[in-house]
Image (cartoon, rainbow, N blue to C red):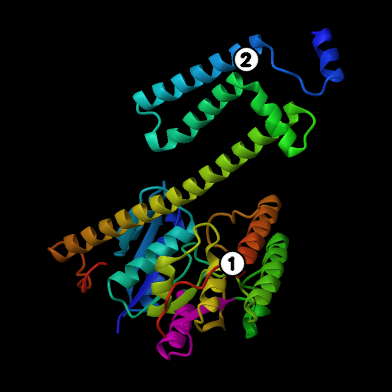
Amino acid sequence: MRELALAASQDPKVHLTSQTRIIAAVLALAFMALVLELIRRDRLQERFSVVWFVAGVGMLIGAAFPGLLTFVADAMGVRDTNVALFSIVLLLLLGLALNFSVTMSRQATQITRLAQEQALEKAREQTARERNGHGAPAEPIEGDRS
Amino acid sequence: MRTLVFIPAWNEEASLGEVIEGVRESLPAADLLVVDDGSVDATAARAREAGALVASLPFNQGLGAALQTGYLHALREGYDFCAHLDADGQHPPTEVALLLEEVYADRADLVIGSRYRDREAAESDDYKPTFSRRIGTGVFRFFLTLATRQRFTDTTSGMRAANRRVMTLFSERYSPDFAEIESLQLAVRQGLRVEEVPVRMLERAEGTSFLTPLRSAFFIFKGMIVLVVGQFRPRRVEVER
């Protein structure tokens, strides 16, 4: 461990050892298998799975071609590839989280409208019931409902 | 000419019956709708016993969604005017009649009942706001006035009267969790005539206000975000004048 840390401090561009690359690749495959399993059990809808498959493939590519990461870090002007990796992943996750908030907001609006429609439907039923005999007479409903 | 008075109610079984009776007395010609916002007590049952029409939301959705339900009902059932008041007994139904006068006379599209605007109401002992509420009121008053370039004193008042232009707008767009303030800003930005009328309000008859100091601070902070964002919203809803 200590040797590794020492090596890291000497050379900012740490090259992934074949061992870590294999672990990364296995993790990526396991991750994609998990996503598949979730879809299969109807816990995750296909349209939301695309981004996670892309993430898994990205992990695989990163494991297969570690030179790519160094290249990206150079392009970003970052000396430490780890920093480049973390900042890219962090930004992507931030974007994803925001995207989920947007989706949630839209669904919250839809749920609210659904609840309102149901409430008004119940009120209309009550009106109809009261008009058909029992209870106080109610105002007639006029016009269409759109 | 038909008028709907609706009352958003969330767990207000204790005070609702009296409010409904009061509305019946002071506005005998108006239809009555109680929007039960997912109450877990006997709110809906009390309302039906009192002879009101009840729209029960299947789960609690917040005041904004409840109010929008009322506007939606008024719009679809072809009402010409609508008004709403709180179910907790703070709003004397006699005052609602004053607000309706204004929209009947077409002096405004949306009328807000203000407990702070002149008349003897401001000095009366009927209504004593708490410290945190006073701060919140002051902050909102300042920012809303800044945003709309129109003087508002009681920005969070839940006693309002409106015509069909407002129904059309509010049933389309109504902020679910910042109902009172954003709706004012929205209406002014859409070019609607919004007016305040002094009213008398009472202390809560039953229950306690949800405002603790921490909640108030959060409430104020959220309100400011809403107002700032509201200034950049597109004026896209077409409301014919």
| Residue B51: assigned label | none
- Which residue does the image show at 65% across and 65% down from the upper left? B228
Mark 2 nearby-residue class (10 Å; few <14, some 14–19, many ≥20): some
Contact, mark 2 vs mark 1 (Cβ under 8 Å): no
Quadrant of the snapshot with the C terminus of chain B: bottom left
Q: Label 1 is placed on what type of residue?
A: Gly
Q: Is residue B163 visible?
A: no
Residue B230: assigned label? 1
- Which quadrant is the N terminus of chain B positioned in? bottom left
Q: Camera-side residue: A5 or B130? A: A5
Query: How many numbered discs, if any?
Result: 2
Q: Position of residue B145 (x, y in %)?
A: 66, 76
**Relative to residue A90, is residue A121 depicted above or below?**
below
Asked whether B110 falls inside the magenta stretch, the response is yes
| Residue at 33% over, 80% down | B80
How much space separates mark 2 and mark 1, taking CA atoms? 50 Å
Q: Position of residue A44 (x, y in %)?
A: 40, 31
Query: Please, which chain is the residue tagged with disc 2 on?
Result: A
Residue found at x 42% / y 50%: B39
Instruction: Please tell me in which quadrant of the rendered image residue B16 appears.
Output: bottom left
Residue B63 x, y percent position in the rendering: 48, 59
Q: Which residues are the magenta region?
A: B93-114
Q: Residue at x 55, y 61 (%)?
A: B178
Residue A141 showing in the rendered view: yes
Same chain for labels 2 and 1? Say yes or no: no
Q: Please give the residue where the numbered disc 2 appears in the rendered image.
A: A21
> Horizontal placement of B180 versus A3: left or right?
left
Q: Nearer the viewer, residue B15 or A66?
A: A66
- Give the side of residue B76 with respect to residue A24, left or right: left
Q: Secondary structure at mark 2?
A: helix
Magenta run includes residue A82: no
Residue reaching furthest to the left: A132
